[in-house]
Amino acid sequence: MHTQSEVLTYRINDACKALSLGRSTIYKLINEGKLKSITIAGRTLIPRTEIERLVSGVN
């Protein structure tokens, strides 16, 4: 079983839950360059470090 600290990336739906934001807000943050994402095998993923950076308010 994986713990939260072992997660390296979040799928969009998981990022929504982690940040308590909707999908459109997550995509808006990505499009505005405020949240970096990566695409692997056609799937958009948000690195854990980006979620932590956004929550801490660090640019």
Image (cartoon, rainbow, N blue to C red):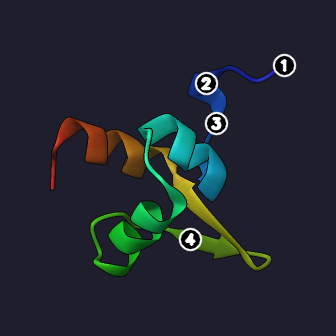
Q: Which mark is residue 4?
A: 2
Marks 1 and 3 in Cβ contact (< 8 Å): no
Question: Which label belongs to residue 38?
Answer: 4
Give whichever of discs 3 and 4 has the lower sequence position.
3
- Circle 1: residue type: Met
Q: Amino acid at mark 3?
A: Val
Instruction: Tell me whether the residue at label 2 lies in contact with that at label 3, contact meaning CB atoms closer than 8 angstroms.
Output: yes
Q: Label 4 vs label 2: CA separation?
A: 19 Å
From the viewer's perspective, tell me whether residue 45 is left or right of residue 26.
right
**Looking at the image, is 48 positioned above or below residue 46?**
above
Q: Tell me the quarter of the image containing the C terminus.
A: bottom left
Tell me the CA gap for discs 4 and 1: 24 Å
Q: Give the structural element (helix, strand or loop) at label 2.
A: helix
Q: CA distance from mark 2 to mark 1?
A: 10 Å
Circle 1 residue: 1
Specify which label sits upstream in the sequence, 4 or 1: 1
| Residue 1 falls left or right of residue 27 | right
Q: Residue at x 28, y 47 (%)?
A: 54
x 61%, y 57%: residue? 12
Q: Residues within 10 Å of mark 3 (few under 14, many from 20)?
A: few
User: Which residue position is annotated with label 3?
Assistant: 7
* Label 2 Cα crowd, 10 Å radius (few <14 / some 14-19 / many 20+): few
Residue 2 versus residue 11: which sits nearer the camera?
11
Mark 3–mark 4 contact, CB under 8 Å? no
Proximity of marks 4 and 2: CB atoms separated by less than 8 Å: no
